Image: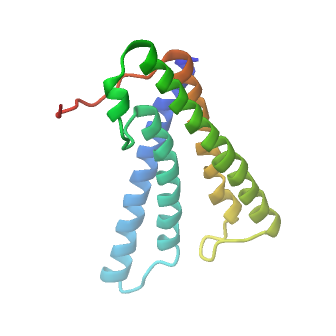
Amino acid sequence: MKQLTAMIEKFLGAFLGLLMAIMVLDVTWQVATRFILQEPSSYTEELARFLLVWIGLLGAAYAYRKKAHLGLDILSQKLEGEAKRKLDIFISVVCALFACVIMIYGGAKLMFLTLDLGQMSAALQIKIGYLYSVIPLSGVLIVLFSFDRIVNGDPEPDHVEFYE
């Protein structure tokens, strides 16, 4: 499981980098067409909005994996050994439950509802349900990363803490 989550983490990081690069190009093209060509592109604003949604939700799963989310760790900093491990497991279970109920179940309901209704985006003519598919996808990733934390413990953060 450790290898699977490490592989998913690397792919997710690369995919997020790709989405960011596409968004930078898209917004650059939007500015160029609006101010240089004096003829704004019709799809760039909508594409940037959709990319931002995907980057935000997939980035949340990636940040959860990397332990980069803000959190109150006053209690966990004071605990050691088995008590700290039990608290980490409890936190991972709560995060997994949230992701299951809100993101996977609720996100899938929203996605299928909008797909059934056939809602289309105005400029790109993409089904809105495809945009919403990132909600359950991110939920699945958070649940997977939570189970990995429960089984294997917390991964070491890549960053260095400068406070004490």
Q: Position of residue 61 (x, y in %)?
A: 50, 41
Q: Work out whether residue 3 or residue 124 is closer to the camera in this orientation and state it.
A: 3
Report which quarter residue 143 is drawn in: top right
Say if 90 sits above or below 42 in the image. above
Say if 11 sits above or below 116 in the image. above
Q: Position of residue 129 (x, y in %)?
A: 70, 60
Say if 153 sits above or below 137 in the image. above
Q: Residue at x 54, y 29 (%)?
A: 90
Q: Work out whether residue 90 or residue 27 is closer to the camera in this orientation and state it.
A: 90
Q: Residue at x 27, y 31 (%)?
A: 159
Q: Position of residue 113 (x, y in %)?
A: 78, 62
Q: Position of residue 116 (x, y in %)?
A: 82, 64
Side of 18 relative to 79 (left or right): right
**Residue ranking furthest to the top:** 81
Side of 111 relative to 62 (left or right): right
Side of 133 relative to 36 (left or right): right
Asked if residue 145 shows in the view, the reply is no
**Residue ranking furthest to the right:** 116
Q: Residue at x 66, y 52 (%)?
A: 133
Q: Work out whether residue 95 or residue 123 is closer to the camera in this orientation and state it.
A: 95
